[in-house]
Image (spheres, rainbow, N blue to C red):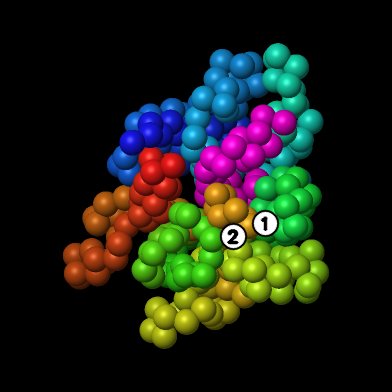
Amino acid sequence: MATVNTLVLTGYGTNSHLETAHAARLAGADRADVVHFADLVACKVRLADYHFLIFPGGFLDGDDLGAAQTAAMRWRHLRCDDGVPLLDSLRDFLAEGKLMLGICNGFQLLVKLGVLPALDGKVFDQQVSLGCNDSARFEDRWVRMLPNPESPCVFTKGLPQLAMPVRHGEGKLVARDAACLDRLAGENLIALQYVHPETGEPTQEYPHNPNGSNLAIAGLTDPTGHVLGLMPHPEAFHHVTNHPCWTRGELDPPGTMIFVNAVRYLKEQ
């Protein structure tokens, strides 16, 4: 089976990188390297040497100018020390069919960059954003999500209802216009939705939908299914004892199942 090398980027306020790398290793990745963004720019590491790229959660640049906005400008305008634009390396990574995961702040970065949802194959054209929660406050709580079985997303394929924690202030998915939102649903690019714990149905009800996201969107994929961005933190639920109700016998499947799907897919290619 193929070797899976995972790159977890950190720096400028990112956190959760160590837990994210740990989750990738638990899922069977052969390598899970935590690398500072500056080392990528300095050509000390290259995207081409990896198969799985993860943008973990954090507070990039203190969310100055909006969550992940400054980081998106770095990606759009910086060149590596060898003169190659960072965006070209990212475009090549995607074109080769490799996998990309953005968690919380990483999801915010992927939408600001236009990597998601990439309708009509328009990568790097921003079509949606993630705005302030309807509650006008930082949300730190556990939520339940339902994967879309019709989605092309390789990360969520065949998964049951999932439980994970959220911790964000800007998680409300807002589309460019109503037509864009309709296409996300119609083309099954909504990979994950917040659900009510009692009905198991997608919900706009607070706090089960912690941010008021349209269509209860918790995670998006692109038309290839090779990119996933989600607001909840799968890396924060990698063992049964991470769940706040595990002593009551609530044995939900861990969030690392998303990583397991990704690594399995890469090993089988």
Front residue (pair 12, 227): 227
Location of residue 79 in the rendering, given as x and y in whole percent from the top left corner: 74, 23
- Quadrant where the image shows the N terminus: top left
Q: Residue 149 has which mark?
A: none
> Can residue 236 be found in the magenta stretch?
no
Q: Residue at x 24, y 55 (%)?
A: 241
Q: Residue at x 72, y 31 (%)?
A: 88
Above or below, 55 relative to 192: above
Q: Residue at x 79, y 31 (%)?
A: 77
Would you name the residue on which mark 1 appears?
117
Q: Given the image, on which type of amino acid does mark 1 rest?
A: Pro
Q: Residue at x 62, y 40 (%)?
A: 94
Would you name the residue on which mark 2 appears?
220
- Quadrant where the image shows the C terminus: top left
Relative to 159, 208 lies left or right: right
Front residue (pair 255, 27): 27
Which contiguous range is marked in magenta?
Answer: 88-111
Above or below, 25 relative to 41: below
Evaluate if marks 1 and 2 touch, with contact meaning CB atoms under 8 Å apart.
yes
Gap in angstroms between the C-alphas marked 1 and 2: 7 Å
Q: Given the image, on which type of amino acid does mark 2 rest?
A: Leu
Location of residue 21 in the rendering, given as x and y in whole percent from the top left corner: 40, 37
Above or below, 230 relative to 70: below
Above or below, 150 relative to 93: below
Relative to 129, 10 lies left or right: left
Relative to 247, 154 lies left or right: right
Location of residue 246 in the rendering, given as x and y in whole percent from the top left corner: 23, 64
